[in-house]
Image (cartoon, helix red, strand yellow):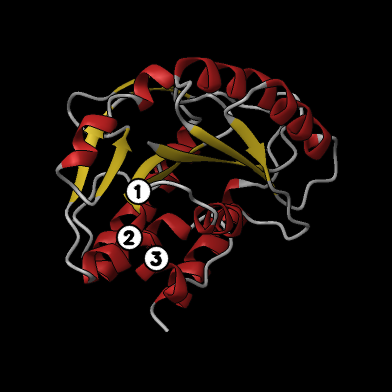
Amino acid sequence: MITLVIPAYNEENRLPSTVKAFANYFPNFDILIVPNGCTDGTEKVAQDLATKYNNVRTWATPIGGKGFAVREGFRRSKHNLVGFVDADLAITPEEFAKLIPFAKENDVVISSRWLPDSNVTKKEPPQVRFAGRIFNLMVKVWFGLKISDTQCGAKIFKTELMRKILPKCVVNKMAFDVEFLYHAKNFGATIKEVPITWKHNPEESKTGVFKTGIKMIGQLASIKK
């Protein structure tokens, strides 16, 4: 079984449909919603969803940051596999399911939008795609990660491996994926990329592309300290 973490920052509108989809598709999953630093009704929505679905629970933190939320969710894993998926339903349960068979033979399984067999049905704005490519190039150069897409929002890890990785982690924001994968590589973990179908599912932007990019570069620097 898998503990599946859904980090949620101000996702009161999109969270119900995402949780409904995953809770119904994966009735044997342990789904953990982690609202983090929310200023809307996300925490209440998460509590209601945990009451509605037997396989859903929630743990909220006033500390903002997707990386922090995922880490704290992983610490609360009840099973030998732990994963996360974004709250925006850009990756459907059917696409997440493609990762699961590879988790038997690999320590880490990650989704990718940028493999030859990947399918992006609705693309991000050009400036976002360009920034993502530059970021990925920096990751390859700085960290030696030969991975096409570190930031796609669905990953599965062996819980035993994550227990080694978590004490080393310092990134609370968006670049946490790189930190996880960098430490996994250093531990000799096998990492498998899986092509998926992905759909950009925008809501009101919480930060600008340039501002986010600068912050993520700073986060990369903190990993190397």
Q: Where is residue 5 in the image (x, y as percent from the top left)?
A: 53, 42
Numbered badge on residue 163: 3
| Mark 2 touches mark 3? (CB < 8 Å) | yes
Q: What residue is at 30 percent from the left and 25 percent from the top? A: 196
**Frontmost residue, 172 versus 137:** 172
Q: How far apart are marks 1 and 2 (CA)?
A: 7 Å
Q: What residue type is labelled 1?
A: Asn
Q: Badge 2 is on which residue?
A: 160
The answer to whether residue 168 is visible is: yes
Residue 145 appears left or right of 173? left
Q: Badge 1 is on which residue?
A: 80
Image vertical order of residue 132 relative to residue 44, above or below = below
Q: Which amino acid does label 3 sit on?
A: Arg
Q: SS class of the residue under badge 2?
A: helix
Image vertical order of residue 197 relative to residue 163, above or below = above
Residue 193 appears left or right of 22? left
Q: SS class of the residue under badge 1?
A: loop
Which quarter of the figure has residue 50?
top right
Q: SS class of the residue under badge 3?
A: helix
